[in-house]
Image (tube, rainbow, N blue to C red):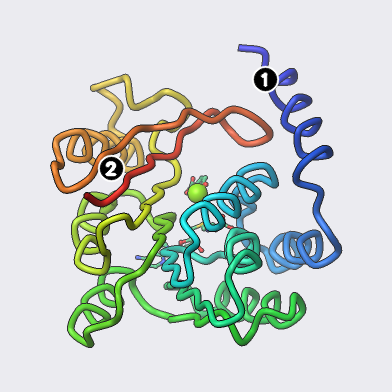
Amino acid sequence: MDKTLFELVDKYIGNLFASEDRQLKDAIQRTVDSGMPQISVSATQGKFLQLLVLLTRASRILELGTLGGYSTIWMARALPASGKLVTVEIDKHHADVAMNNFEQAGLKDKIEIHVGKAMDELDSMIAGNEQPFDLIFIDADKPPYTEYFEKALALTHPGTLIICDNVIRDGKVLDEENNDQNVQGARRFNRMLSLNDKVSSVILATVGVKEFDGMAISVVK
Ligand code: SAH
Ligand code: DHB
Ligand code: MG
């Protein structure tokens, strides 16, 4: 696999269709400067998520795993004036950096950040009769992806789009012997998803500036 070529092509596509403005560039810079891992979605993936928001005409979005809020900014920018995005982050430091990024991007009013464990936040939103979301982006820790997805279904309506990041892991999901928790989590999740009759799904393999990976895409029936 010629990784360099994939990177160059992704940059080419990004330059044409996903150029980052000052706010997006600064969001990444502050993420790096704060010592956080740079595992945000790529620019072209951010633009892809933004198109999905437009396609679904989403006005309510849920994200699990905020980091510095880079993917959040791409999605929130496509929300209508009255739209809202709830993003869940376990790490207070990450949440603080993200909050600052949302403020700088002028998106503070549209984004609600919940600091806590994704599972607990899902439980409390379900208990609190939170209105269903139109689009859900799952991108937190990988081992419990299956449980996140199954819980999140309680916060959907027919037509809700659910995107789950990092489900191919450099193709390592093909190796049944691979004991990496992230790989096992993805493999368990992918199997569940293929059997789940509440949704219709596919996985889009992704190559580019990030490692070879994939996003699962599901529509709630
Ligand atoms: N969506 C971001 C990247 C998220 S990286 C982007 O593309 O820009 C994954 C994030 O999930 C990290 O910030 C990590 O702290 C957070 N996380 C890990 N375990 C979690 C949990 N149990 N609940 C909520 N967030 C969690
Ligand atoms: C990892 C997490 C991500 O959300 C991602 O997009 C890439 C890598 C990780 O934890 O390794
Ligand atoms: Mg990810």
Q: Which mark is residue 209?
A: none
Distance in Å between CA atoms under marks 1 and 2: 25 Å
Would you say the beta carbon of the disc 1 residue lies within 8 angstroms of ligand 2? no
Image quadrant where residue 186 sits? top left
Question: Could you tell me residue 78's position as x and y percent?
Answer: 62, 64
| 5 sits left or right of 70 in the view | right
**Residue at x 77% of width, y 41% of height:** 17
Question: Could you tell me residue 21's position as x and y percent?
Answer: 84, 59
| 200 sits left or right of 46 in the view | left
Say which element carries label 1: helix
Q: Looking at the picture, which amino acid does disc 2 mark?
A: Gly
| Badge 2: residue crowd in 10 Å (few <14, some 14–19, many ≥20) | some
The N terminus sits in image quarter? top right
Q: Which residue is mark 2?
A: 185
| 52 sits left or right of 37 in the view | left
Question: Could you tell me residue 142's position as x and y percent?
Answer: 35, 49
Nearer the observer, 155 or 29: 155
Q: Looking at the picture, which amino acid does disc 1 mark?
A: Lys
| 208 sits left or right of 160 in the view | right
Q: Which residue is mark 1?
A: 3
Nearer the observer, 27 or 183: 27
Question: Could you tell me residue 127's position as x and y percent?
Answer: 18, 84
